[in-house]
Amino acid sequence: MDLFGAVALNLHGLARSTEDLDIFVAPEPANIGERAPYQDLTVTVITPRMLYKMKKNTVRLKDRADADLVRRHFNLEQD
């Protein structure tokens, strides 16, 4: 099980509040692999590139804003 969404943003150092927890039940290895500490656990988190791709074209404005923040913070090219 791997994390994505706003929780992943927080684990990558980009603070945003959330009301839910988004998880991959069976992720593809190319989309994950970054391990991040969370309290007394180590969790697997979606990569910034995949987080950007998942959020950039949604209808929710906050997802598009997240995508732009991730792109700028991690110096990703726009797709």
Image: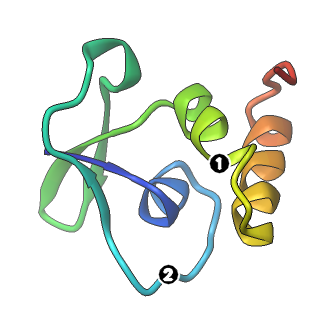
Label 1, residues with CA under 10 Å away: few <14, some 14-19, many ≥20: many
Q: Provide the secondary structure element on which disc 1 rests.
A: helix
Label 2, residues with CA under 10 Å away: few <14, some 14-19, many ≥20: few
Q: x, y percentage for residue 67?
A: 74, 48
Q: Is residue 58 left or right of residue 39?
A: right
Report the front residue among 39 and 51. 51
Circle 2 residue: 18
Q: Provide the secondary structure element on which disc 2 rests.
A: loop
Residue located at (47% from left, 30% from top): 47
The residue type indicated by label 2 comes to: Thr
Q: Is residue 67 left or right of residue 46?
A: right
Residue located at (26% from left, 54% from top): 23
Q: x, y percentage for residue 40?
A: 12, 63
Q: CA distance from mark 1 to mark 2?
A: 14 Å
Question: Which mark's residue is nearer the viewer, 1 or 2?
Answer: 1
Q: x, y percentage for residue 28?
A: 26, 19
Q: Is residue 59 left or right of residue 49?
A: right
The residue type indicated by label 1 comes to: Lys
- Location of residue 1 (image quadrant): top left
Report the front residue among 37 and 68. 68
Circle 1 residue: 55
Quarter of the figure that contains the C terminus:
top right
Residue located at (78% from left, 41% from top): 73
Sequence-earlier tag: 1 or 2: 2
The answer to whether residue 61 is above or below residue 74 is below
Q: Which mark is residue 47?
A: none
The extreme bottom residue here reads: 19
